[in-house]
Image (tube, helix red, strand yellow):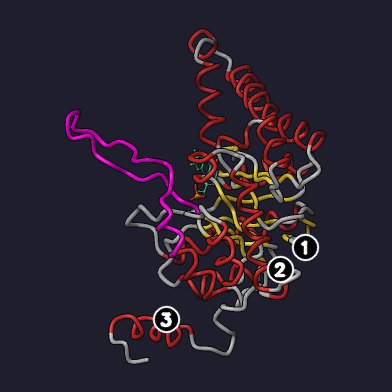
Amino acid sequence: MDTKTKYLGLDLKSPIIVGSCGLTSDVDKMVEMETAGAGAVVVKSVFEEQIIYDIKRNTHVVAPIDNYGDSYEYISQHVADDSLNRHFETIREAKRRLTIPVIGSINCFSYENWLTYAIRFQEAGCDALELNMAILPYETSLSSDDVERTFTQIINTLKKSISIPISIKVGTYFTDMAKQLQQLSWMGIQGVTMFNKSVQVDIDTEKECLCNASWLSNPDEMHNTLRWVALMSKKMRCDLSASTGVYTADDVVKMLLAGAATVQVVSCLYKNGIGTLRQLNDGLCQWMQRKGYDSLSQFRGKLAVQPNEKASVAMRTQFMKYFAEIV
Ligand SMILES: Cc1cc2nc3c(=O)[nH]c(=O)nc-3n(C[C@H](O)[C@H](O)[C@H](O)COP(=O)(O)O)c2cc1C
């Protein structure tokens, strides 16, 4: 059974890839993922906040006794480099030990650092870069134009500066999501990952403080991704990678039928182990065999909303089927 596919212009032996997470910061685990059948790995993101945290932690001794701003700057730079170099060493080692593509991932908040980190990721040898750009529009002062401008500026700058394929990982917080996703896909990027799952908030009622809810998704969460992949896959000029709530081979098949180029898994591996990748690939092959498909291209996007089809009508039809049984 041929499960080979192209993603971001890269050759993958399987459309099932491991999304960015703690498991992909460890090269031994990435080797395990390749052995279990992962088509590619997205390495744990470098977060700008983490680099700043490292700088603060390592320079607090120097700062009070040093009246010379230059040396503080110098040491901060040194700590930042050291912190980043640890990530790049992981990428270099992963490239030495893996045959599957290794995709880097960054998440910054300052404009300059998107560029600095992206160039360094390319130099470290990763095959592509996923920009974790899931912007949460928390501020009342932030308009949808501001959010759009942030995407445009960062993507345009990075496209001019690096030559490896770029994909962006987005969240669901767009007022006009279909239009935004389509316009992003016209910017010359190679892929969009739908969707990032931001940390969920909870409240500890005993301590009366905000805390994080579970990081891991539930299987039910795949339906939102499925809806948007089906709606957008034929309307975008780049690959779609489906992420969030994928747990079973059946989920993988659904995402492919909806038009995803690849399907990312994370929570499923945390809950059920890296070996689950083998079951997902076996399940995909068994389904293809049962259905008489020899390759992914024979069924990928079969159930996507067609470019000439009105999305609102397609979705309304589903709604009416369920609630009014009139179709
Ligand atoms: C423990 C953990 C760490 C994560 N770290 C990152 C990260 O560094 N960068 C990123 O883009 N996404 C990160 N994610 C989000 C995942 O890549 C993925 O988008 C999300 O978990 C939804 O997929 P899932 O339902 O298969 O878990 C993390 C998720 C988990 C559970």
Instruction: Name the secondary structure under disc 2.
Output: helix
Q: Which mark is residue 315?
A: 3
Instruction: Please provide percent x and percent y for residue 67.
Output: 54, 12
Picture residue at 54% right of the left edge, 62% below the top: 250
* Residue topped by disc 1: 2
Q: Name the residue type under label 3.
A: Met
Instruction: Name the secondary structure under disc 3.
Output: helix
How busy is the neighbourhood of tag 2: few (under 14 within 10 Å), some, or many (20 plus)?
many
Q: Is residue 29 above or below residue 193?
A: above
Q: Is mark 1 within 8 Å of ligand 1?
A: no
Q: Which mark is residue 51?
A: none
Q: Are marks 2 and 3 in contact (CB under 8 Å)?
A: no
Instruction: State which tag comes first along the sequence, 2 or 3.
Output: 2
Instruction: Work out how far the residue at label 2 is from the one at label 3, CA to CA, in angstroms.
Output: 25 Å
| Residue 144 as seen in the image, left or right of residue 61 | left
Q: Is 136 covered by the magenta stretch?
A: no
Q: Say which of marks 2 and 3 sits in front.
A: 2
Near-viewer residue (82 or 71): 82
* Residue topped by disc 2: 296
Q: Is residue 109 visible?
A: no
Instruction: State which tag comes first along the sequence, 1 or 2.
Output: 1
Question: What range of the chain is rendered magenta?
Answer: 196-223
